[in-house]
Each structure stands twice: as structure tokens, then as C-alpha cells.
Image (spheres, helix red, strand yellow):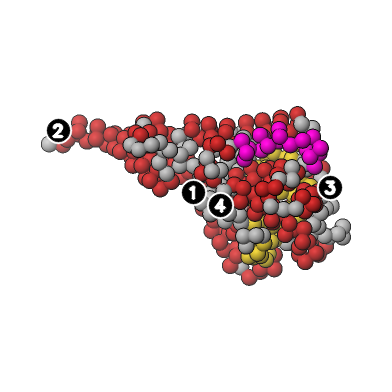
């Protein structure tokens, strides 16, 4: 009897593995995050295309690699529970027009600095414009404050669906206004601010700097305030950033995740991609206002398949061609998550190589204390 069963069991098992599992995974993802933007029944026809099914399943399986960062998650959870650490931070400081919150971290050697108050880092996390939370980055902020002898703030912003990308930029600009007003209270130099962002956060940092330099009315700030804030931003450091939205959308299409991605939703549709693309905005800013832009430093891992390394390479070339100071660091072996998670603990593989690049830029900006 077993001899008769085995020829049947094997094909059934293979069928489940190659058909049932991928289709189940893909359908579940699309039910949760959204169906293709097609009319009527056509959205289901598009959703059931074999290429979309298998590409989406591959993308889901790639995310399982994030389980390797589980230890860091438990570390950051326990970090807040340790009473000794409470002296190093202040949580839940309200800022801005929407009452967003930020956490602030002090460098451990702040009392030993004799060169005036330390500079300020504003770290903007990523999350595809639709997720993220400031407390997740407590280990990163703590290490960054120590490595750079800087005060570090990590603000929340209105991710989709609570807001669109313009609202996110407004929140970051509000955080910078808060910094200008709060330097004396929290003992940091309000005129020495550096924006650092990862992935979508790097995109938002670049876009905020461009909107401020261009004095955009959409920020709902007086031009004089925008100029003051722009002058206080000494540099922008982007980690694996998205700078051309249309090109990244094409990359998402190749991976068959463009409809489940938050990106086009957060930007109110494909028609707004140029408006929200730093590469496009950069070409529209006049030469006089371009001179107000701070230096940029772009770091990108060569093994990044979520945001291809060409994103930073092309943005760097464009900045350089417009005489905006820019440094490009291509880091071999790093993927999209390593470049941010490895900043959280000194025992991570790429911790020192990444901080070496950031510190080099810090010295160029004359911000690194001896």
C-alpha cells in the first residue's frame, strides 16, 4: 500500500510547496496591505499573476532575515527598564503643531566638554513612510551620542495613514524649530545641528533641507524662520536613502511590491512623485538658494536590495554637479538593515566602519570634540 501512495504524496507535497504556500502568503499580504490599483475584477487578475505571487513571496521571506535582530530588540526593551540609564535621556518631550513627541539623549561625557555646549543630532528613522517609533532607536541614539559627543534627539512624525509626506516634512521642520528654541534648556548648540536619517528617514532629511533652503510656503513657516533653521543645519547624513521616488517605484515594481508598499499612498499617488523627489526638487532650486544647502554625506551598503546603491550614487552625482558639497561612502557587504542596526551596539560587525565614515564627516564639519 505504501508503494502505491508514494508516487501520489510527492507531487502533492511539491504542489503545496510551489503553489499553495506562495499563493497563500501573497494573498494574505495583499489582503492586509492593499490590492493592485486596478478597476473591478482586474485587481484580482493582477494580484494572481504568477510573477507577482512569487516575487512577493520572495520579498516576504527576505523579511524573515530580520529575526536575526531579535537580540537587539530585547536589549533596547531592557535598556529603558534600567534605572541607571534614566540619567542619560528625557522621554516624551512635546514639540510642533501636531503635538508630536521626541526623546532626547545626553552624551556621557557632556560635563567634561570645555568647548561649549555639544552639537545636536536629529535622527529620523525609516519605515517606508508608514511605520516606525522613536523608542526603537534608543540604543542607536545612546551610542551615537557617545561616539559623536553630541546630544541626540529622535522625534516621531506623522507616518501614513495619519499623514502624508508633506506632513512628515513639516513635523521634522517643527523639530528643528524646537531645537532652535530649546538649546539653552537642554545644553546643546542650537546653531550646530546635523540631520541623520535612514531609508525613508534619509529621504525626509534631504527633502526637509531642500524645502527649507527653497523657503517653501507649504512648510507654513515665515521665511525668516526658515532661513534661521536652514543656517543652523550644518550637515545632512543619509543612510541607504531613497532620493528619486519614481526610480524607486520602478524598483518596487520589479519586486512586485509596489501596491502593498506605503510609498505611493504616503505621497498621495504617482502624480506627486516629482514633488517629493529630492532629485527633482534639487533641479528646481535656484543657484542662490542652493548655496544655503548644508554639506551632504551619503552612506550605502553594496548588498542593499531594498534600496539599490544607485540611489545614493545618482543623488551624489547630481549634488556634485550643482556644486553642493557631498561625500559618498559605499560600504561593501552591508544590507539595508545592517547600516542602521549595526549602529546600536559596539559588538556589531559593521559598527566601527560605519561610525568611522560618520566621524570623518563630523571632523569636516568641525563638530568632533577632541
- Of the residues under marks 1 and 4, which one precedes in the sequence? 1
Task: In this rendered view, identify the residue nearer to me: 338 or 266.
Answer: 266
Task: From the top left corner, tell me how far across and down residue 5 is, in percent.
Answer: 17, 35
Element on which disc 3 rests:
loop
Element on which disc 2 rests:
helix
Task: In this rendered view, identify the residue nearer to me: 264 or 117.
Answer: 264
- Of the residues under marks 3 and 2, which one precedes in the sequence? 2
How far apart in space, not on screen, are marks 2 and 1 (Cα)?
Answer: 41 Å
User: Mark 1 sits on what residue?
Assistant: 67
Mark 4: give few (<14), some (14-19) or many (20+) Cα within 10 Å: some
How far apart in space, not on screen, are marks 1 and 4 (Cα)?
Answer: 29 Å
User: Mark 4 sits on what residue?
Assistant: 163
Residue at the image point whose x is 77% and y is 66% from the top? 185
Task: From the top left corner, tell me how far across and down residue 279 is, in percent.
Answer: 66, 34
- Of the residues under marks 3 and 4, which one precedes in the sequence? 4
Query: Residue 10 is drawn in which quadrant?
Result: top left
User: Mark 2 sits on what residue?
Assistant: 4
Amino acid at each position: 500500500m505504501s508503494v502505491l501512495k508514494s508516487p501520489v504524496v510527492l507531487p502533492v507535497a511539491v504542489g503545496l510547496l510551489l503553489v499553495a504556500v506562495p499563493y497563500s502568503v501573497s494573498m494574505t499580504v495583499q489582503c492586509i496591505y492593499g490590492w493592485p490599483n486596478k478597476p473591478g475584477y482586474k485587481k484580482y487578475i493582477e494580484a494572481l499573476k504568477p510573477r507577482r505571487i512569487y516575487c512577493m513571496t520572495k520579498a516576504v521571506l527576505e523579511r524573515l532575515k530580520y529575526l536575526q535582530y531579535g537580540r537587539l530588540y530585547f536589549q533596547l526593551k531592557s535598556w529603558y527598564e534600567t534605572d541607571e540609564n534614566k540619567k542619560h535621556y528625557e522621554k516624551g518631550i512635546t514639540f510642533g503643531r501636531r503635538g508630536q513627541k521626541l526623546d532626547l539623549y545626553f552624551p556621557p561625557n557632556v560635563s567634561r566638554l570645555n568647548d561649549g555646549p555639544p552639537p545636536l543630532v536629529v535622527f529620523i528613522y525609516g519605515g517606508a513612510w508608514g511605520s516606525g517609533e522613536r523608542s526603537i532607536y534608543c540604543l542607536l541614539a545612546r551610542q551615537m551620542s557617545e561616539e559623536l559627543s553630541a546630544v541626540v534627539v529622535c522625534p516621531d512624525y506623522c507616518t501614513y495613514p495619519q499623514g502624508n509626506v508633506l506632513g512628515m516634512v513639516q513635523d521634522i521642520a517643527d523639530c528643528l524649530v524646537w531645537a532652535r528654541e530649546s538649546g539653552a534648556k537642554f545644553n546643546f548648540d542650537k546653531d550646530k545641528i546635523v540631520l541623520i536619517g535612514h531609508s525613508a528617514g534619509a529621504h525626509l532629511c534631504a527633502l526637509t533641507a531642500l524645502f527649507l533652503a527653497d523657503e517653501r510656503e507649504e512648510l507654513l513657516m515665515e521665511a525668516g524662520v526658515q532661513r534661521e533653521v536652514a543656517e543652523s543645519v550644518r550637515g545632512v547624513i543619509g543612510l541607504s536613502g531613497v532620493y528619486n521616488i519614481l526610480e524607486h517605484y520602478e524598483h518596487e515594481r520589479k519586486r512586485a511590491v509596489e501596491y502593498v508598499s506605503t510609498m505611493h499612498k504616503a505621497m498621495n499617488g504617482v502624480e506627486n512623485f516629482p514633488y517629493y523627489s529630492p532629485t527633482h526638487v534639487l533641479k528646481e532650486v535656484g543657484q542662490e538658494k542652493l548655496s544655503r544647502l548644508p554639506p551632504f554625506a551619503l552612506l550605502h551598503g553594496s548588498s542593499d536590495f531594498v534600496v539599490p546603491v544607485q540611489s545614493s550614487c545618482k543623488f551624489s552625482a547630481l549634488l556634485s554637479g550643482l556644486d553642493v558639497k557631498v561625500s559618498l561612502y559605499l560600504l561593501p557587504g552591508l544590507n539595508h538593515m545592517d547600516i542602521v542596526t549595526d549602529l546600536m551596539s559596539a559588538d556589531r560587525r559593521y559598527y566601527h566602519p560605519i561610525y568611522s565614515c560618520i566621524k570623518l564627516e563630523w571632523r569636516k564639519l568641525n563638530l568632533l570634540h577632541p
